[in-house]
Image (cartoon, rainbow, N blue to C red):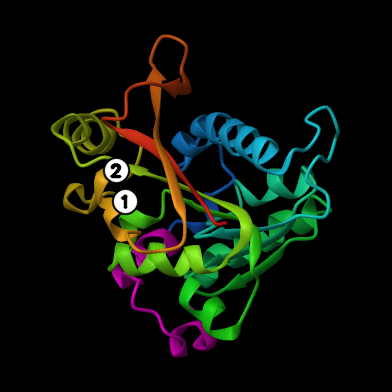
Amino acid sequence: MTQAASSAPSWSIDPADVARFSAIAAEWWDPTGKFAPLHVFNPCRLAFIREEALARFGRDGTLRQPFEGLSLLDIGCGGGLLSEPMSRLGFDVTAIDASEKNIKTAATHAAEQGLTIGYRPATAEQLLAEGAGPFDVVLTMEVIEHVADPGEFLRTCAKLLKPGGIMIVATLNRTLKALALAKIGAEYVLRWVPPGTHEWKQFLKPEELRAFMAGEPVEMQGPFGVSYNPLTGRWSRSADVDINYMMTVTRG
């Protein structure tokens, strides 16, 4: 984390999680490395973001860059696995992460692809304090389960959203099924992710996300489940929200 990020309000930051992801930052774009599960998961979450944004803004999905002229903030962007395709779809992308190593990896890869993305090591609280945005779309994908104060984090992220905009939140449900499959199975049996990547007690139930936003001038929809098919090796939308799910937050 840079000095600028560390001197800003940062109550949502969990230093242990930042250090954990910083240590493996160089592997973000290796589809067979430690982030291989995210590469497999990406098509499903990209499709969800695209569908929700098309519907929200009434854009033409047949266009190569249907979201031209719209701004997007990717919070906890990691190595840029979502930021790059969002940029290709026409969004003006700002992407932040608490790990400077992640940001360097992401910026280097984007430059190699000829993409212009506003990467910077920062927190959501820092952007809000600076008066950044607001943004048409805010993404907090697989981030909230890694922060120290998820309620304050989510409310801060929502404040960065334009009236008429949409925020998409993706996380893990705190159920026994998620403990068995997303924690024990994924980390210790299948070795999809390094042991210690997730802390089951930090997983969040959909009703908790709703409670965090009670009294805020926003509307929440969902949860929308996603599930993995071991026979096809693919993720897809599902009625099952017991493990992974997404929710949308709209303002005005």
- Look at the image and give the residue range highlighted in magenta: 1-23
Residue at 54% in and 87% down: 4
Instruction: Say left or right for 188 vs 52.
Output: left
Q: Residue furthest left?
A: 176
Residue at 52% in and 57% down: 78
Look at the image and tell me whether residue 212 can be seen.
yes
Are the residues at dot 2 and dot 1 in contact (C-beta closer than 8 Å)? yes
User: Front-most of 115 and 136?
Assistant: 136
Q: Is residue 2 magenta?
A: yes
Give the label on residue 210, or none.
1
User: Front-most of 204 and 180?
Assistant: 204
- The kind of residue tagged 1 is Arg
Residue at 48% in and 36% down: 36
Residue 39 pos. (x, y %): 54, 35
Instruction: Say left or right for 54 vs 193.
Output: right
Q: Is residue 192 above or below residue 151?
A: above
Give the label on residue 206, or none.
2
